[in-house]
Image (tube, rainbow, N blue to C red):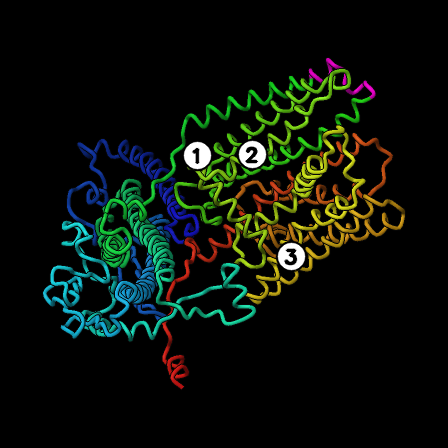
Amino acid sequence: MVPEWVEAYMDYNGLKRVLKQIRSYKHSKLTRAASRVSQEAQALHRSFSGLSFHPRHSDHAGGGDIEDQVIKVDTVDDDDDTRKLYKTKFLKISEEGSEFEETFFKKLDENLNKVNRFYKEKVDEVLEEASLLDKQMDALIALRVKVQRPDASNVNLEKHPSDKVVVDDASDDSTMRLPGSANRDIVHGIERTSIPEEEASQIVTDIVPVACSDGDAEEGDKQDLREILERVKMNDALGDPISTLKGVFGDSRNDEVISKKGLKRAEEQLRLVFSEFYQKLRRLKEYSFMNLLAFSKIMKKYEKIASRNASRNYMKIVDNSLIGSSDEVNRLLERVEVTFVKHFSSGNRREGMKCLRPKVKRERHRVTFFSGFFSGCSIALIVAVVFKIESRKIMEKDYGTEYMANIIPLYSLFGYIILHMLMYSGNIYFWRRYRVNYTFIFGFKQGTELGYRDVFLVSTGLAVLAFLCFLLNLQLDMDWRIKDHKTLPEVIPLGLVTVVLVILFCPFNVIYRSSRLFFIRALVHCICAPLYEVTLPDFFLADHLTSQVQAIRSFELFICYYGLGEYLQRQNKCHSHGVYNAFYFVVAVIPYWLRFLQCIRRLCEEKETVHGYNALKYMLTIIAVIIRTAFELKKGRNWMILALVSSGVATAMNTFWDIVIDWGLLRRNSKNPYLRDKLLVPHKSVYFTAMVVNVILRVAWMQLVLEFNLKSLHKIAVSTIISCLEIVRRGIWSFFRLENEHLNNVGKYRAFKSVPHPFHYYDDDDTDDKDD
């Protein structure tokens, strides 16, 4: 089932509940009838030699066809539409208990009408989209011919001879022969010799809407190359930095349509459009099949329970309805396949079908094995680190506290990353359990998305690497004051960071390359905000970066510690550098500032005030972070009061936004009081607990403003713990945020992403204005 269409499917479980009522009634009725027959048999035994069953039951036991005596299905026209509605009349209404069966057929009709209505809406949508794709292909074909033959300005794409192109009327694939090339056939700008013979024989014309007649299709083909190119322009959406800057400071229109670069970009966009359109057609076909199967199964159950032969009569109506008789989807599927193979895979059907039908990712046993193996290794290394510290009694020595205060901030970076990945792994597990379509929401390509086992494997693998380096660091650095001065132990954390970055940016197809590229792309979009169009993965990642302020500061610490040579003295005195303190402010603000810019971009594009309020929320958070950081560096009572007030205001607004806007909870008039109408988690207490935990963890970070008389190491430990709690809070927030997004998609039946078309046709008014 398509998760976002779940409410449009036949309510199979609801009909099963009605059948249970019928079965319960039939059982009680048979019990009473058996008792009554037994009593009557004893009373009449002396008068009759045998007992025969009531004639009413003999009709059902016989082999005669009595379907017309059970139900009668009428079709009525919908007042608001041209669709037909089905209404079943139950003919055994006079029998006792017939109200249950009448209710069953009433609900069955409601489901059939609902399914047909939804199916018709979706078929109309794909037909309309097919007509748009037909025009897009016309523009692409014209652009291909123009790029390959720049001098062919008057090429006529009509199916009749012209000065420049000779078209074979006997062929259905618009074969064009250029002058002087009698043996070179061009099929919409592609040499026929480059297409395999077995594929070329199956090539048909481009997508033409099924609703169009042949006359309309022929009329639409009667236009020359120059006419098409004059009526079309490239869609240059503000989706990348260059186009965004052009749109802000100048004309964003792309005048250089006829170019190899423009052709390549148009082909890439249309590949995505066709792929997404094909997936939509496949899901629509599966929707039809699953509903037909559900109607067949529920009618068989009805026959078995009610002992009535009404299935064949009703299934005839279902088969003759729109969902059972419509063939538009199958024909469109065939045309999309042929068009895609012909124009986007050089006639290679195998490669074309790989793009249209990507394989579903399979769970691998080795992932589970290595996840368990790395988990055990991580636990063993943690125990080894604790025993190493206790056996050498590092914390009891004079230099022990200073040493741990230097080394913990370097390795805490990996702790934050590992914890964040573990939370993400848990989120994926629960998203799958409660059927949140996270792959569609994030826009993952089918077959490349990571499962919770994959994420858990990466996090435990990084944990093993980090703890191993930490243990090695302790072993080499234990007696550094007695031994000669060595820098090898100090560069171990830097080497670990280097290894992680090399793996992240590795261009080879190893260690989940597609997922790494997806993350890097989203990260670049966040850093370059607001120059890129904001999508859900972009602002979702930016939100998570706001919970990793301490991890980002750890990167700054690495730069200071190793760049300024602090590691040579084995002392962390970065706060004594003015440049470090200045960037200490900047680094804390960067994640919130990026999120603020994203909100401004969305406000300008979507014109929705909610993005303005969201931007205000992040601006208040930026002010609170700046004041709190100033208090952390300068101290003082006045700074403390300002930090408490600003942090309190920011915390209150962020908490309200989390629960009410992002999670969609605290709706007083909803079916579930103080929650929302639709909930995926069956236990309501989970939502109330999550709200309370979110409030507590939101307030927890404010304690950093309070001035406690703690040692340096203890302050680092407290800061690390609170940062970990913020990561946990962000993980909880992520689950309910995507749950709310999924339910919004379900309410709008939004199951496929919208891919922009590369070409735009001028309408008549635009053409007139252009001529004027």
Task: Give the residue at the far top of this rendering.
Answer: 391
Visible in this render: residue 102? no
Type of amino acid at the residue the image marks with label 3: Phe
The residues colored magenta run 387-398
Label 2 vs 3, first from the N-terminus: 2
Which is more toward the observer, 408 or 694? 408
Residue 596: image tag: 3
Task: Give the residue at the far right of this rendering.
Answer: 637
Which is more toward the observer, 319 or 120? 120
Label 2 vs 1, first from the N-terminus: 2
Work out which quarter of the rendered image holds the C terminus and state it: bottom left
Label 1 vs 3, first from the N-terminus: 1
Q: Is residue 416 magenta?
A: no
Residue 510: image tag: 1
Left or right, 376 with respect to 327, comes to: right
Dot 3 surroundings within 10 Å: few (below 14), some, or many (20 or more)?
many
Q: CA distance from mark 1 to mark 3?
A: 35 Å
Please give the residue where the numbered disc 2 appears in the rendered image: 500
Q: Report x, y in % for residue 699.
A: 74, 44
Which is more toward the observer, 86 or 679? 679
